[in-house]
Structures are given as structure tokens and as C-alpha cells.
Image: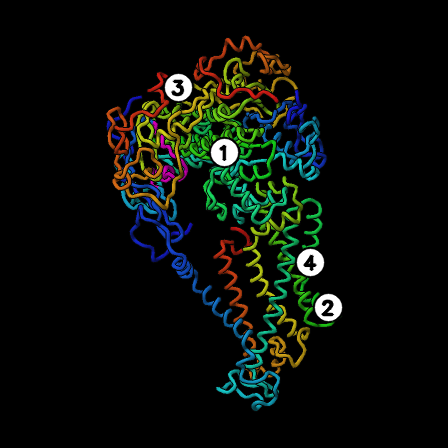
Amino acid sequence: MTAPLLELQRLECAYGGRSAGRAGRSVVHDVSFCLAAGETLALVGESGSGKTTIARSIAGLLVPRSGQILFEGHDIGMAAERRPRDLLREIQFVFQNPDSSLNPHRRIAYAIGRPLEYFFGLSGKARDRRIAELLDDVHLDLGYMRRYPSQLSGGERQRVAIARALAAEPKLMLCDEIVSALDVSVQAAILDLLRELQEKRRMAFLFIAHDLAVVRWLAHRVVVLYRGRMMEAGTAADTFSPPVHPYTEMLLHSVPELGVEPFVGTEAETAVDPLADHDAGCPFAPLCPRRIGSVCDEELPAWSSAGGAHALRCHIPAAELAELQSFPWNRPEEPPVREEVTSA
Amino acid sequence: MTVAAAPLVEVAGLTVDFYDRDHWVNVVNDVSFTLFAGETLGLVGESGCGKTTTAYSLFGYARPGSRVRDGAVRFEGRNLIGLSARELRAIRGGAVCLVPQNPAGSLTPSMRVGRQIVEAMEEHGVSGSHRDAEQRTVELFAQVGLPRPQTMVERYPHELSGGQQQRVITAMALACDPKLLVLDEPTTALDVTTQARILRLLARLQAERGMSMLYVTHNLGVVAQICDRVAVMYAGELVEVAPTEELFRRPRHPYTQGLLASVPRLSGQNGGGARLRGLLHREELPPGCRFAPRCGFAEEACFTERQVLAATGTGGEVACRRWEDIGEPRGTPAETGSRR
Amino acid sequence: MDLAPAGTPAGGEIGRGWTVSRAAGAVRWLRRQRLAFLIAAGILLLHVGVALTGPVWAPYPPDELLVGDPFKSPSREHLFGTDNFGRDVFSRVVYGERTVLSLSLTAAGLAVVAGSALGLLMAYVRGWLDEVVMRGVDVVLTIPPLILSLLILGGVGASYPVIIATVAFFFAARVATVIRAAALDVVSEDFVTAARLRGESAASIARRELLPNVTSSMLVEFSLRTGYSVLFIAGLSFLGFGSAPPTPDWGLMINEGRSYISSSPWLVLGPSLALASLVVALSLFTDGISDALGLSPFRRAKA
């Protein structure tokens, strides 16, 4: 079996270093997963989960405190400034906010053309031709080349941002909540586009999202994060039907849909300090509706398998969770939306 | 939920323009709907559809640079358009309260949160003495689910999480026992689990107090959970109004159908049928149906004839001359059998 | 948000096209500007016109002595009268326009170019280098420019290149702080991060990504610094550290005419009016373009 495209091994990240006087707090603990070419892995979590931090460290915007990030087998855990140009080209980042991802004083042709110039030395007609091709790939017509970002809608700007990332011909695209700021119909179109691109180019996506319905549509595999730790990992089909981690369960039930009752456990906000370190015990214990006792507060649960490549971290055995949980949106006869990608 | 006979709010033919650099742009066009006591009406649409402007008119607020060209907004029978600032002040924060989108932006950073609520109450002469107001604040904080209310009132806004701030803002809105709560996307900036809690809270508060809510959002899922009726807006116009279940199970207007089809579902199923095509081009709106350029069912007449809301016979209204021909979109529950 | 200004159409039109031709748009833009701005622009155009074409139509050569009786008061022949040497004051003022404008514009231009480059780089680089350099800039800003300039010019000699360099040096410091502030607004935006993730160098990012976002600030700074330069350089000449006699330099002329101010005020009035009108026009013009470009009048950066 060939090496995965991207592999994280026990990644730990922190903000603030020696200059903060003491070691900065870790925001990502012990995260490990891999991603194969042509696959979409979704990193799911809410604020404080560490998902954006993970993406930023893969991109080189942040240096990990410990652990390894391997790209095609090579350790890339260094700042972007120290990375070779080819590596920078092969990992591309698409940002969340369509308003700030494009230079307002530069035309679209520049936004897409700059990576072409920089990575491939294209200029003049050759570059313009390639820009036209890329615009076509994201379903924008030629006229957009001469426009400024302020003349484009949010969805159009995200398409341009995607085209800019594609221009570098990457192997891996890091998509940080790229549809969260978009209207529903626009979001749907962008998601279609991403699927299409993946099928055509066999590109790998690391898709960061908090919207589980979107993840269901797009991802092959899912990693669920809470307060910087992995709580669950498995295929998309696995993580949307029982058994799932209690946090995943809460997330799923929190997605508002007709006929779905929210299963939030306690309605009140807790007094939990979101920044407090949790050295011992399960980080989700204070809010967990299925908390079974003091073991949850004292001992970090070990990984337990829930069948195949599906694993979760809970003191409650997976078989028991499977009995306790039920999801009204699942009809057992429906096949999962996306088949798992088999590595080449 | 019991519904009073006379509507609490009646919006009739509201038309609002906004002055953009050198010409007037229409943002709300001839919008009419009613809101009864004790019910929650969802106002949905995508960016720029005019839902916020419409919602804000419910307490007589017009953004600087805008004008109400036509129409009336009647609160308990009284037209808010044209009232003096003083008269409006009596209504705002008293009978009609706003829960805005960004909680951090609505809280004074240098004042303790409890004090901000007390001030709001004193401003409206709701609570008797200062002591009473403070006591009520603690009670309100408990009602909105904030932990340890006695200590919470002493905190500053930046010491609170996003969810807690939103609850404080909600408490502030409830402080004067309003009849109508206007909520402008109050959970957009929050995590999904926090959002779920806030929605639960709102449902409970409404049941307890019997107040009406106008919930403005672009998130159809939220609407599905918390609203009794839904009004869908497109390009400044109301295209469909219906009871929630009715709207979701049998959307009539092509825009509503497209919108629902575009929402990704937890089941992984897409709405099938037609997704929305194209984009809204404000500069090229036809005089007839504004959705016509993007509509798969549009005919010649659609571009020229103004569409008006007509009853569908199942409790809703739709502004589409072809609604009876259109029928069910493919893949909706009515076609594929009962869902969930 | 401004309320609709006077003259707004009473009714609205829905559903028709909003697009207007560009020319009509430009005319409307012009009409929206403040009157003061338009007048200031007119006056500036006048000054520039005089600088460019003056020598062609000036009634008398500036250095020619005794074209009329000395100390003649303003008349049709001598619009600003004659000075102690019988030279025509008006012609001297007209010729002096070139000196004033070319010196100030060059100094201001240099200040903006150097200051912007520094400001942009520091805004991107941040960290200890930014701290050190900006503290250096702060030091320069605290020095009274006039006194240090006098020392420099006294020591090195008051040639035009030295004057320009000295003035530019002081103003570049101010420009650097302003442009750095403007650039800081955009440095944290995602498109800059995108450039950083390409591995682009600091200089490349400053030039390609940051620069286009500060050009309006630079324009306003240029206009502002020109105004200050005019006054500063005139001041230097007044103190004798500028042009040497018999150059028709306004500051110099004011100094030379000082002694006669009670008896023949027009020797001073002529150049003074010219100087004042230029400076005031530049000031109002700066306000106007800063308004038109959407910049706040205080920070000269995006409001």
C-alpha cells in the first residue's frame, strides 16, 4: 500500500511561546490521521476545537510544538518561509471569508494569474489562456478577468479563490469553512463544484466545517474534534449512524431540521471556562449528556473500535452506544452518499 | 398555541427604498403580512432580499439613507410609520424588542452586564426601584439559562462566551416584557450546539410568555425548528407565506422549491429536483415577477405581470401565477413518501 | 451613512435599468463635490499654469532693473508694483512660481516614495525590526525640522538638492507612519496570507499586494506634503537658507521687502498672496481628494 498523501502523527500545537513567559497553552493535542490522494477528509468541530489550527499548521502558518506532519512521506512541520517552492505549490489553502481572500485593488486576472507567474513562470498570452481555462473550470465566464472583487458576489469570489488555488495544480487543498459565509443556494453550487473538481483531478481535500449536513454531502471520511482532541474518526457513513461519540451525537442533533428534536442534554450554558486546560479526563465530560460517572472526569478514554476503520474515544462501549442512540434521518436502506476511496 | 383574533402586527404594502450614491434602489417592494399574538413567524431569504429592512420596520426603524415610499406597519392597530421619535421610543424596547445579530456589538464593553439590563429597565420605567430592577435582572438571567446569575450580573461582556452574551442580550430584550420580539439572525455567529440551546430557550420563553416572535434568518433549518409560519422573500418581495410544515413538505413557489433543494441534509439526500440557477442581478429586475429570470417555469407573462400573493387553500399564500401548474418538485417528501 | 442630499429625485423607479452613462456619472460626481474643493482645484490649476507658461507671457524679465521707477505702487503697467531695484514684482512672482512648485513637488514626491516604501515594509515585516525602525522614525519626528535644517543647510550649503533632500527626509518620516498604518489595515487580510503561503518575499508582497491598497493614502499624503513643503521651503528662503539673491524666490522676496513694509507694502504683499493662495488651495484640495477617495480626514487612511 502506498504512503498516504498526508499523514499527521500525534500533532500538538500551541499559540504563544517563550515570549509569553511560560509555555503557551496547547490548542491541539495528539491528533493523528491520514488522507489519501483523491479523498476528502472533513475536520469537524466547533470553535475551540482546533480544526483551523491543524489546517494552518499543515499549511505552514504555524509550527507544531510536537508531533509530525508528513506530506508524501516527508516531514513538513516547518514554517512556510522555510519550505521549498514545490511544496508550497502542492498544498493550497482556501479561506473562509470571501471578503478578505482577494485583494480589493487587484483585478481577478491578477488573483489567478499571480500563482501562474510565480510557480510556472507563465506570462502574457500563455498566462491569460490558462486563466481563462481556470475560470471555465469554476464556471465563471471570461468577462470576470477584468473585474475587481467588489464587483463580484460572495459566491463568485469563492470560486475565484478556488481557481487561484487550482492554478498552482496542487495535490492537497485545505478548505477552511469555505462555504460557511455563503447563502444556501450559492453554497450548494460551490459544493457541487468541489465534487466535480475532485472527480476530474483526483485532488485531496481537507475540508474544515462545522456544518454536518455539508460534511455528509462532501466527505469520504470524518474526524470529529473537541477542544483540540480527536473524539472520533471514521467514514462518513460511519459517523452519521450509530454508534457515534456522544459529542458527535450532540452535533448531529443540533443541526436544525424539520422533525429533528435537538438532543442537547442540558439547555443551560454551563459555567465551564472554555480556555481551561483539561489534563485529566475526557474534555467533553462537563457537557456530556451521557456522562457515566467520575471515570469520565478522571480518565481520558482510550480509542475503541466501532467496526472497520471507525474508532471513537468514550468510556461507554461502542455496542452500548449503538443501542442507546437513534437518528431519525437515517433510513437503513439508503446507501451512503460517497464510497470510501480505495488507495491506489 | 392559541392565536388571537386580531393581528398584533399588520404590515400592508410596505415599500422601502435606499439611496445608493446617486439614485434610489428599491429594497422592499409591496410587502404585506400579519403576525398574531403568541406566534413565531420566520422571515427567510438570502442576502439582500430585504428581510432585515422589513423586520426593522416592525419597530419603526428605517436605516439612514432609506425612505418608506409606501405602506403601513400597524402595531396593535397603530401605524408606526410617521410616528414621532418620542412616540417610537415608548414602543421600542418596551412593547417591541430587538435581539440583534451580533451580541458583542450590542453590549457596552465597559459596563457590567447586569447594570446594562437595569438601565434598560429604568429607561422604560418598567421596574420600580433600583433594587427591584436588580432583583428582576437576576431573575431574568436565571430564566435565560445563565449559570450562577448573582455572579453573572457582575461580569463584563468580554468575560462571557458568545452563547452567554447572546443570552444576556435576550434577557435585555425580555426585560420590558415585550409583546413582540424581533430576532435578527441571533444565532448566526454561534456554534451549532450553542445555537440549539438558544433555540430551545426561545421556544420555552415564548411558550411561557405568550409573546410573538419575528425570526429573521437565512437558515432554513432553524426556521423548521422554531417557527409556526414562514414568509419567504426574494429581491425585496414576499413570494410565499405558509405554515412551516406545509412550506417544507409542499413548497409552492419555484424559488422556495429551489431553496429547499439546495439545503444539504443529514441523511445525505439532496432535495433532488431543480436547484437554483443563476444569480440575482438587481440592475435587471423585470417589472413582473422578480424571480422570472432564474425560474424554470417562467413564461412571457411572468416577466410583465406583477405577481400577488394568492391563497393556496392549504393555509398558505404564494405569489406565482403558475403555482397550480407547477405541482410538486421531484424528490420532496410528498412525492417520496413520509419523511423522518 | 449620509442622508440624501438636496436635489434628490422625489419618486423612485423600480424595475427599469439603473445603468447610467459614464459621462453623466462624472458630471454628477463633480456636482457632488464641495464647492471649496472645486475652487481649490481651480486655483491650483492656475498656479500650475503660471509655473508652466509664466515666462512666456510675464510682462518683464524678473531680473531686469529699473523697468520702472523703484517703489512704484501697483498700476496697470506693474500689477504688483515695483521693488527697491525697480524690478516688476508681478513678473518676479510669476517666475518664482516655478521654483516654488518644482522644489516642493520634488521634495514631497521623494518623501512619499521613500516613506511609503519604508512604511509598507515595516507593516508587513512587523516584529523587532519594525519596532526598531519605527522608534527611529519617532526620533526623527520629534526633532524640530526647521532648526535641524538650518544646521544642515548652514553646514553643507543651501543648494537646491540639499534643500530637497533635507525636507524630504523629515517628511518621509511622517509619511512612513501614515502609510504603515494604512498598510496594517490590510496586512492581516487573507489575500496577504495567500501570498505569504506562496513563499513570496516581503518586498514582493509589499509591492504587489500592499501597495495598491495604499495608493489613495499616498496620493493624499503627496498633496498634503506638498503644501507643507511650500511653506517650509519658503520659510527657509525667508531665513536666508534657500535661494540666493537675485533669484525670484517668494520667501526671499518677502524677506527683502520686509524693511519697506510700512512704506511700500506691495513688495511683500505680492509674494505673500501668491504663497497664501497656493498653500490654502493645496490644503483644501487635500481635504477634497481625501474625501473623494473615502479616507478619513484625520488619519488619511481608510475611514
Q: Name the one closer to the observer, C77 or C143.
A: C77
The amino acid beneath tag 1 is Val
The amino acid beneath tag 3 is Gly
Q: Chain of mark 1?
A: B
Q: Chain of mark 2?
A: C
The amino acid beneath tag 2 is Leu
The CA span between labels 2 and 4 is 15 Å
Q: Quick check: marks 1 and 3 in contact, CB under 8 Å?
A: no
Q: How many marks?
A: 4
What segment carries the magenta color? B40-60
The amino acid beneath tag 4 is Val
Residue C81 belongs to magenta span: no
Q: Secondary structure at mark 2?
A: helix
What residue lies at 57% left-to-right and 27% top-to-bottom? A38
Q: Chain of mark 3?
A: A
Is A40 left or right of B231, judged from the image as shown? right
**Residue B113 badge:** 1
Q: Secondary structure at mark 3?
A: loop
**Which residue lies under the disc numbered 3?**
A259
Quadrant placement of the C terminus of chain B: top left
Is A337 left or right of A79, judged from the image as shown? left
**Which residue lies under the disc numbered 2?**
C151
**Label 2 CA crowd tier, 10 Å (few <14, some 14–19, many 20+):** few
Dividing the picture into quarters, in which one does residue C227 lie?
Answer: bottom right
**Which residue lies under the disc numbered 4?**
C140
Q: Chain of mark 4?
A: C
Quadrant placement of the N terminus of chain B: top left
Q: Name the one closer to the observer, B67 or A118.
A: A118
Which residue in the rendered view is the most extreme toward the bottom?
A: C69
The CA span between labels 3 and 4 is 69 Å
The CA span between labels 2 and 3 is 83 Å
